[in-house]
Amino acid sequence: MTLTRRRFLQCSLTGAAALGATQLGWASRALADMSRVRAGRRLRILVLGGTAFLGPAIVDNALERGHEVTLFNRGKTNPHLYPDLEKIVGDRTVSHDALKGRKWDVVIDTCGYYPRVVREAAAVLAGNIDQYIFISSISVYADFSRKGLNEESPVGTIEDEATETVTGETYGPLKALCEQAAEQAFPGSTCNIRPGLIVGPRDRSDRFTYWPVRIARGGEVLVPDSPQTVTQIIDVRDLGEFVVRCAERKTCGVYNCTSPAGDLTMGEIFETCRKVSGSNASFVYADGDWLAAQGVQPWSDMPVWIPLEGPDAGQPFTDVSRALAAGLVFRPLSETVRGTLDWWATVPSERKGRPLRAGLTAEREAELLELWRARQG
């Protein structure tokens, strides 16, 4: 990963044509609907976390499918959610003792960042659960310059494996160590899921939200590189559904979870945002080298965009064939954009009044558009 992306990870941790033709919705809606039929066996599911972003997507799908869910978290993030569910309050970085003696069919760990914490959770739950599902990240991989990274590709390492300081440099290796800790505690009964960029409703990082919100405002929109530049994302609701599917089928192993390699382009994202929002936006594509010369950073200033040359060039080509075979399906991109905009409409006005956590400010975008026009003569 580039230093730019690492720095951004650190600060963000805490249709025809555009609408229907995208291969991101390669699976038929019939297949997706079949996956939502109530499960035959009611599972007792313990979710570590569960009220921020991915957590609610997992909980909502589990409840829809008739499972029993218990939440274990500090009770600080969106404590109003799920008033009818059992909630066990505790800080897992300090202790998992509140879980002692309790039995569940599966634990879904959405918030493990340190191997020590995962080991401690596993020790408390040993003998009391049948499966450990750990939410990891594709950031575990050591070399993103290679195309076709799969679950067997080498993961990153760090010298101090005991560190509990999460930065762009340590995030991926620590997640890899967490995976190992879970597998060591529950050999053959662990499912390590490695999502790519998770997008959709409730995303507090704005790493995708920027584009639907900005394009909905209309006018000239500065966009990077070329409409044909490929990228990869996954709707949080599709990921949540896959996680619950893995619990129901007791699917174990390691799975990359993002959109199929090479299927989604930046141009599709922009055009879909325009169609769904009904805006009059027009797109000004600026050369990637020129953007770099202006200090515009991929991933943070230009969300979702990853240049196809350099140390991150292989990332938009991550192999997800194993997850597809295990049942990962995708909704159309238009649903992701619509869901994001509908959620954004509910965000408090004070939050909307602040700059987004990713993307360009209106002032910076206007400045760059003027510079680009001057360059073009």
Image: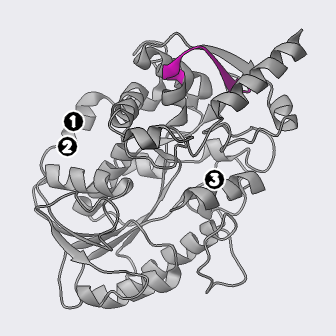
Which quarter of the figure is the N terminus placed in? bottom right
Marks 2/3: CA distance? 30 Å
Which quarter of the figure is the C terminus placed in? top right
Q: Secondary structure at mark 2?
A: loop
Q: Which residue is under mark 2?
A: 36
Q: How is the image coloured?
A: one colour
Q: Is residue 196 visible?
A: yes
Marks 2/1: CA distance? 5 Å
Question: Is there CB contact under 8 Å for labels 2 and 1?
Answer: yes
**Residue at 51%, 49% in the rendered image:** 205
Residue 151 forms part of the magenta stretch: no
* Residue 279 % position (x, y): 48, 13
Total marks shown come to 3
Identify the magenta region: 215-225
**Residue at 56%, 22% in the rendered image:** 270
User: Tag 3: residue type?
Assistant: Leu
Q: Left or right: where does residue 148 sit relative to residue 103?
A: right
Q: Which residue is under mark 3?
A: 149
Q: Could you classify mark 2 by the number of other residues whose Cα lies within 10 Å: few (under 14), some (14-19), or many (20 or more)?
A: some
Q: Report the front residue among 101 and 210.
A: 210
**Residue at 33%, 56% in the rendered image:** 243
Residue 222 forms part of the magenta stretch: yes
Q: Secondary structure at mark 1?
A: helix
